[in-house]
Amino acid sequence: MDEYYQALVERDSSYEGIFFAGIKSTRIFCRPTCPAKKPKRNSCEFFESARDALLAGYRPCKRCRPMELPNHESALVKKLVNAVEASPEKRWRDADFRSLGVDASTVRRQFKKRFGMTFVGYARARRMGLAFDAIRNGKRMIDAQVGVGYESRSGFRDAFSKIMGTLPDRGKQHILTADWIDSPLGAMLAIADEEALLLLEFVDRRGLEREVEQLRQQQNGAIVPGRTSPIDAIDRELKAYFAGTLQIFQTPIRMIGSDFRLAVWNELRSIEYGETRSYKEQAEAIGNPQAIRAVARANGMNQLAIIVPCHRVIGSDGSLTGYAGGLPRKKWLLELEAAGRIGC
């Protein structure tokens, strides 16, 4: 993403519509040509659409107005976006539009034409983005639910499923189930079908929402909140793992990727609890000693944190590098396993 950061610094108009920049320190997102002072590279993350930025918990920048077309003032859009920011928990109805002096059908038409989503979709995405953000920062799901205006768990689940994918025709689509799992290192998101676990990630992993959407598309299905036996199983096993009493996971999993990635991930599973391996050794183990960088990229694409133990791969000099969950978590996991190994 260095290319995108350079475009942001240079305010390159040729990148308009290509990406949006999320500024971590202020939790706003901007278009590439935003005139505001530019943050450092590590303070930015990039999104392909405004919807992705909203789902990541960012709000639109008031200077560059990323929800509006470039160089185009829209009093209606500005008015409505400001209304959402003033009351993000609000669920909009036709009467609310009338109270603002605007026609509901006009609102729906303009938002759909300009942004590819309805105004109600925008408001819902912003509301759920705030909920995702609250959960990332340590709040319980019930607190996040109430904080964004959902009085019931079922209402929150309904809204969640609208973001993750609508309930499908069970005869034609694959239904996946998602739920949060608490851990000493923060909340994790588990997604499974009735047979196997497909995803286990820390909820603050960068780009998680896009990762979930890609999984949904790959499986030609919908993701709905709830539990299946694989999620119950991994919840139990994670508790034992973090307590230091479990070293080998038995929860059935399904890995989805290219032949190369599957080879890398299967080899990761051969690294024993309490041991580490370098990226070079990992490349040699799959019979491709020149593929060190490709192995590192494949490790980063692993969707089953801890179970497929990419945290056990380190630099050749023993340094901790390249963990999507964050290096502090990687260090914590290795120390937990090292202590358990000594106790065997």
Image: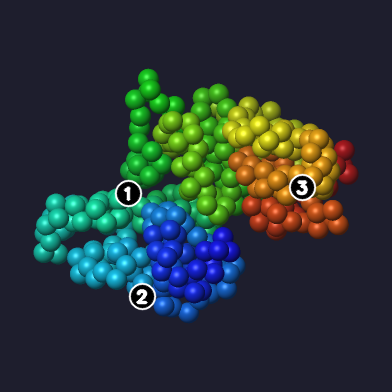
User: Would you identify the image quadrant in which residue 14 lies?
Assistant: bottom left
Residue 208 place in picture, x, y as percent: 52, 49
Report helix, strand or loop for mark 1.
loop
- Residue behind mark 3: 292
Disc nearest the viewer among 3 and 2: 3
Report helix, strand or loop for mark 3.
helix
**Residue ranking furthest to the front:** 14
Q: Residue at x 54, y 67 (%)?
A: 5
Give how far apart the Cα atoms at labels 2 and 1 are.
34 Å
Residue 252 place in picture, x, y as percent: 63, 27
- Residue behind mark 2: 63
**Residue ranking furthest to the top:** 171
Give, as a three-letter code, the residue at label 2. Arg
Mark 2 and mark 1 lie on one chain; the one further toward the N terminus is 2
Q: Is residue 275 above or below residue 109?
A: above
Q: Are marks 1 and 3 in contact (CB under 8 Å)?
A: no
- Residue behind mark 1: 151
Residue 209 place in picture, x, y as percent: 48, 48
Report helix, strand or loop for mark 2.
loop
Answer few, some or many: residues within 10 Å of disc 1's Cα (few below 14, many 20 plus, some between 14 and 19): few
Mark 1 and mark 3 lie on one chain; the one further toward the N terminus is 1
| Front position in the image: 48 or 309 | 48
Residue 100 place in picture, x, y as percent: 14, 64
Give how far apart the Cα atoms at labels 1 and 3 are.
50 Å
